[in-house]
């Protein structure tokens, strides 16, 4: 068994799967670290998560403002930021909440036209980054 910390990107952090994932990761802080959190907007719930978890990067489709981030956390905004976040050097595993962030993949690019399906994201990542 390795003692290496596994680093996670949680896309759709405020959805039920995202919230449950963060809860499980918190049970094992020496084994898992959420380095990226993503949500559709910088809602109050997302802001609270970012302050509690302290990821390296927070990603949203739309931001109300940028001055709410804790020290050490960057903010990325827009559809392309989601793929960039999921493929960062400090991400080992990506957890995707089904459809809550309103992104869609078309021709290998994220567009804000629809809902993001987990299977499509994982398939895209497997094709482009394996």
Image (tube, rainbow, N blue to C red):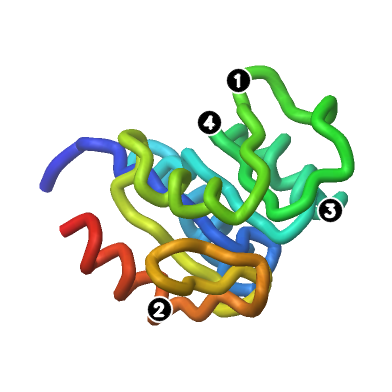
Disc 3 is placed on an element classified as loop
Could you give the CA–CA distance between mark 1 and mark 4, rounded to whole angstroms?
6 Å
- In this rendering, would 32 be left or right of 81? left
Are circles 3 and 1 on residues that touch, CB within 8 Å? no
Q: Nearer the viewer, mark 3 or mark 2?
A: 2
| 3 or 2: tag closer to the N-terminus | 3
Q: Kindly give the residue lying farthest to the top in the view shown.
A: 71
| 3 or 1: tag closer to the N-terminus | 3
Could you give the CA–CA distance between mark 3 and mark 2, rounded to whole angstroms?
25 Å
Establish if 45 lies above or below 77: below
Determine which of the numbered discs, if any, sits on residue 1 in the image: none
Label 4, on which residue? 56
Could you give the CA–CA distance between mark 3 and mark 1, rounded to whole angstroms?
19 Å
Q: How many marks?
A: 4
Disc 4 is placed on an element classified as loop
Looking at the image, which residue is at 81% across and 54% down?
45
Are circles 4 and 3 on residues that touch, CB within 8 Å? no
Whole-percent x, y for residue 4 in the image: 22, 36
Are circles 1 and 4 on residues that touch, CB within 8 Å? yes
Label 3, on which residue? 43
| 2 or 4: tag closer to the N-terminus | 4
Q: Nearer the viewer, mark 2 or mark 4?
A: 2
Mark 4 crowd level (few <14, some 14–19, many ≥20, 10 Å Cα): some
Determine which of the numbered discs, if any, sits on residue 72 in the image: 1
- In this rendering, would 47 be left or right of 101? right
Label 2, on which residue? 120
Looking at the image, which residue is at 51% across and 43% down?
36
Establish if 126 lies above or below 42: below
Q: Quadrant of residue 17?
A: bottom right
């Amino acid at each position: 068994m390795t003692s290496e910390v596994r680093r996670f990107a949680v896309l759709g952090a405020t959805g039920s799967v995202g919230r449950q994932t963060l809860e499980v990761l918190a049970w094992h802080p020496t084994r898992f670290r959420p380095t990226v959190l993503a949500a559709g907007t910088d809602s109050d719930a997302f802001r609270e998560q970012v302050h509690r978890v302290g990821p390296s990067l927070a990603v949203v489709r739309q931001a109300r403002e940028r001055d709410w981030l804790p020290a050490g956390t960057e903010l990325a905004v827009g559809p392309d930021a989601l793929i960039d976040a999921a493929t960062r050097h400090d991400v080992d595993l990506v957890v995707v909440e089904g459809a809550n962030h309103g992104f869609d993949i078309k021709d290998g690019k994220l567009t804000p036209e629809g809902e993001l399906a987990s299977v499509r994201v994982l398939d895209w990542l497997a094709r482009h980054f394996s």
